Amino acid sequence: MDDFERIRAVLLRDRLPFAARQQLQQDIGFDQIINNRGRGRIYRYQGPLPPRVPNPVVRGEARFQRVKVEDDVLSYSGGAGELVGLYVAAHTLDHYSHYVEIEILDIGDLGQICIGLVPDKYALNCQPGVEANSVGYLAESGKFFINHGRGICDTSQSGPPCGIGDRMGVGIRLVDDPAGGDRHSSRVFFTRNGQEVKSFELTLRPYQLFPAVGMQSEGEEVVLRLDAVWNPDDITQMVVDCGEEDWVRLDDIRLNGTILEYTGRGRTIHDVGLAQAKYPLDTTNHYFEFEIVDPGDKCYVAIGLAKQNYPMRRHPGWNIGSIAYHADDGKLFHGSGMGVRFGPKCSKGDIMGCGIYFPQDYDSESEAQLNDEEDDAKGEEEEEDNENDDEEGQLDELLGIGGSDDEDDMLFRPPKRHHHKGKGTKVTVFFTRNGKVVGHKEVCVPKGGFYPTIGMLSCNEKVRVDLRPLTG
């Protein structure tokens, strides 16, 4: 068949039966021939190309080195050399599975646990985010590694650090998400305990990114959840339900569900973190408690009761209108910086509680009205307290200790004791440790009542609070 016959056959093929057209296409070997506007040139025309649907990069098995895998638990097994160990999942992210997370069971010696996304054939001797086209979130420092090359990270990119019990997640936004990236990249986001903390743009698409977990010290252990689901609307609702509305004050303390975390410097007496509940204890809700999840550097945590608008930077129990049981020394503080021997010391895992035995005829509303008469006397006393506090601040400045950044300069010089001039209804405040009553003390209720108050003063302290373990 010469060229003329080929052209004539193509021009007439629509008139041929289907079987004949199919045979003709096989004989010719192309879909259509055109005459380039009469110039005598013959071209093959394929028509518009169909949209390209990339095949996901899927391996049959996960890859890992210096990591021990037992079901969904990953643990470091690199020995004492502290070489990086890496686990890379077998499947990439896609439209249906676009989020994974880990729960930290143990931070080990260094806390170098890192979650992230890496491309195919990623080296198993470096953390996620170190090599090109990868990103990672480090637990110990909260820093992010984004395509920075081996051993380099951008210290300006950081989020909250993570510890035992925290959940770290990584995912990609879907293509139809308005906040997602363009068609040639992926918008990667990281979460901590379900809340998004940072997002980045990567040049790879989801079907090219594998979830990865890095480790680097003995004892590090996590639970890997490749089927995790992240819904920001559900997370927001969960945080509210977990007690965010229960707290009226959080000074240098962050609320994470039911866990309070100290966020202050933890270096001097002026770095106290204070959390105070929104409502005072009464006859229907007369007890609360917390579990020490992490004692931090010194376990300077305290549980107690304080008047409304208790001064900032003061541990509960140090100032008038407060009483508290301190974990580090087991002492009871009642309106004074000089504590008295009271009960055993407390540490990680211990549950400390505080409550009130109210008189049978106690009436919260009547008590509030009676206490109104003491406003003037208390006002004069607070003015005197402020003057004394100013004098102490001037003395600290003179001695050069007020703004010290030295961790060893923990000048615990609690405030002077001021005598309470007013008289209120007396109640019995009691404290517990692991469900057993440690002791009790009779005190006067300040105006407005006693509010559950928690103090912290050293780095990494965490407590899990239950404001209503008992009612009635």
Image (cartoon, rainbow, N blue to C red):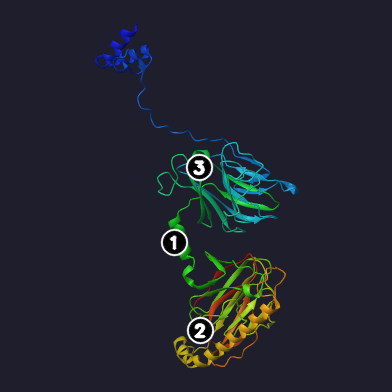
Q: Is residue 159 above or below residue 188?
A: below
Secondary structure found at label 2? loop
Report how far apart the C-alphas of labels 3 and 1 lie in the structure. Answer: 26 Å
Question: In the rendered structure, which amino acid carries the disc numbered 1?
Answer: Gln
Report how far apart the C-alphas of labels 2 and 1 lie in the structure. Answer: 30 Å
The x and y percentages for residue 165 are 59, 59
The x and y percentages for residue 348 are 66, 66
Residue carrying label 1:
237
Secondary structure found at label 3? loop
Residue carrying label 3:
93
Q: Nearer the viewer, residue 274 or 69?
A: 274
Q: Residue most toward the right? A: 80
Residue 19 is left or right of residue 454, and the answer is left
Q: Residues within 10 Å of mark 1 (few under 14, many from 20)?
A: few
Is residue 153 visible in the rendered structure shown here? yes
Of marks 3 and 2, which one's residue comes earlier in the chain?
3
Residue 439 is left or right of residue 470, and the answer is right
Q: Residue at x 60, y 56 (%)?
A: 142
Q: Residue most toward the left? A: 15
Q: Residue at x 62, y 43 (%)?
A: 149
Residue carrying label 2:
449
The x and y percentages for residue 114 are 61, 50
Q: Residues within 10 Å of mark 2 (few under 14, many from 20)?
A: many
Q: Is residue 306 above or below residue 296?
A: below
Question: In the rendered structure, which amino acid carries the disc numbered 2?
Answer: Gly
